[in-house]
């Protein structure tokens, strides 16, 4: 999986909990990921797809049980998916829940493109991986479809699965040897199919969900919209942080202030920036360089005034910093013939 894909850290926490329950050392599971158990337990934290794939590979190696994917899928609760899970529980029926899941779950877990269609009175949920799943492919596909079948079953049944499976699974690889030991606990699974699919009767779409609550559903949707906006804003956390770095009275917000404005802990903010290959000081320097160039393009301001405006009380320190950013001094930069892209006509 790619480092460009990120997933909620709580997904790793559920795997860690399962391994602990089986008597395995958590440190062995976390080896090579750069993660720790505390980080996995932080609600707003996300980890890279590559880190999650390493957790999966480690889990199979340590347990010597590739059937771990089935147990992890069967144990996954709706609440694992945060506000999306609460929203699904609050929907009026399975049709509304699938619509909500398509709107929000793909953004929370951006591993698959999902297409829902009707064929011969059956609902077909087709899952196409968006990234190369690598050595974790079969594990991940099996885990996801089992988890989704459990989700459907819990929404429309008062009984926990596998009391009454109403769905079946298609998978695009041969039947693994470990499947036989789990067959009686799982939905019907068909292997060597063209794609990854879940199928269930169309009539189930309008079956009421016992936990339906329209008020709770709207609250959950509002929270999902906020999370979706956060995930889709610009290129990620980079842009969110930069929007907070506004200089006032010669001072930029520090890490603690920005973290508070984004409703994150300082530790979480640092680590999420690291996922994007950035550091807070790097972003602050980028913003200072941008603001410096914008102000230097206004000839009525002296270099000393620009230095003070971007937080440098000593103009010499500003000159050193500017040379580091651009390779030339502020005065030399100002003498360049074309500064149009940096000019503005009014005060900021």
Image (cartoon, helix red, strand yellow):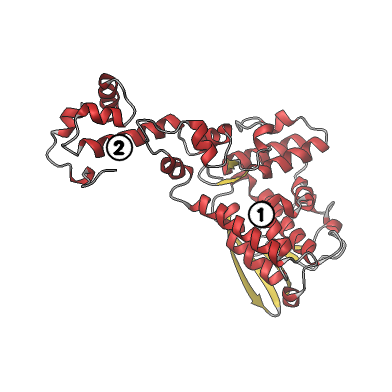
Q: Which residue is mark 2?
A: 291
Which of the pair 278/172 is nearer the observer? 278
Q: Which residue is mark 1?
A: 83
Residue that sits furthest to the front in the current view? 249
Secondary element at tag 2: helix
Visible residue check, residue 348: yes
Which of the pair 325/133 is nearer the observer? 325
Q: In the image, what residue occupies the spot 79% across and 61% down?
A: 154
Badge 2: residue crowd in 10 Å (few <14, some 14–19, many ≥20) = some
The quarter of the picture where residue 42 lies is: top right
Mark toward the start of the polypeptide (2 vs 1): 1
Q: In the image, what residue occupies the spot 83% across and 53% down?
A: 182
Q: In the image, what residue occupies the spot 60% across and 63% down?
A: 102
Whole-percent x and y of residue 91? 70, 66
Whole-percent x and y of residue 308? 29, 28
Whole-percent x and y of residue 24? 79, 32
Numbered badge on residue 208? none
Q: Quadrant of the C terminus?
A: top left
Which of the pair 153/140 is nearer the observer? 153
Is 305 rendered above or below residue 80? above
Q: CA distance from mark 2 to mark 1?
A: 38 Å
Whole-percent x and y of residue 152? 75, 63
Secondary element at tag 1: helix
Is 234 rendered above or below residue 41? below
The quarter of the picture where residue 295 lies is: top left
Badge 1: residue crowd in 10 Å (few <14, some 14–19, many ≥20) = many
């Amino acid at each position: 999986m790619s480092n460009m894909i990120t997933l909620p850290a709580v997904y790793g926490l559920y795997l860690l909990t399962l391994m602990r329950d089986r008597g395995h050392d958590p440190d062995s599971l976390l080896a090579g990921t750069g993660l720790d158990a505390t980080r996995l337990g932080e609600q707003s934290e996300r980890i890279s797809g590559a880190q999650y794939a390493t957790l999966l590979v480690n889990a199979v190696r340590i347990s010597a049980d590739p059937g771990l994917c089935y147990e992890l899928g069967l144990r996954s609760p709706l609440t694992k998916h945060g506000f999306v899970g609460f929203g699904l529980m609050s929907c009026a029926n399975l049709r509304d829940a699938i619509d909500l899941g398509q709107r929000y779950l793909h953004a929370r877990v951006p591993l698959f493109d999902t297409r829902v269609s009707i064929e011969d009175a059956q609902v077909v949920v087709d899952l196409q991986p968006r990234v190369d799943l690598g050595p974790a492919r079969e594990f991940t596909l099996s885990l996801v479809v089992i988890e989704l079948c459990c989700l459907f079953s819990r929404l429309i049944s008062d009984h926990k699965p596998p009391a009454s499976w109403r769905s079946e699974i298609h998978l695009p690889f041969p039947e693994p040897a470990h499947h036989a030991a789990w067959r009686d606990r799982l939905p019907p699974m068909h292997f060597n199919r063209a794609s990854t699919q879940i199928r269930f009767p169309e009539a189930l779409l309008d079956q009421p969900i016992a936990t339906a609550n329209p008020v709770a559903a709207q609250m959950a949707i509002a929270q999902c919209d906020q999370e979706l906006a956060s995930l889709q804003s610009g290129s990620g956390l980079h842009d969110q942080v930069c929007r907070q770095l506004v200089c006032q009275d010669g001072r930029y917000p520090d890490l603690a202030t920005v973290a508070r404005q984004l409703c994150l802990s300082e530790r979480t903010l640092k680590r999420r920036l690291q996922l994007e290959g950035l550091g807070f000081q790097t972003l602050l320097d980028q913003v200072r360089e941008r603001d410096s160039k914008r102000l230097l393009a206004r000839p009525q301001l002296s270099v000393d005034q620009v230095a003070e405006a971007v937080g440098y009380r000593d103009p010499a320190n500003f000159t050193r910093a500017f040379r580091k950013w651009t390779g030339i001094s502020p005065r030399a930069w100002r003498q360049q013939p074309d500064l149009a892209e940096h000019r503005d006509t009014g005060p900021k």
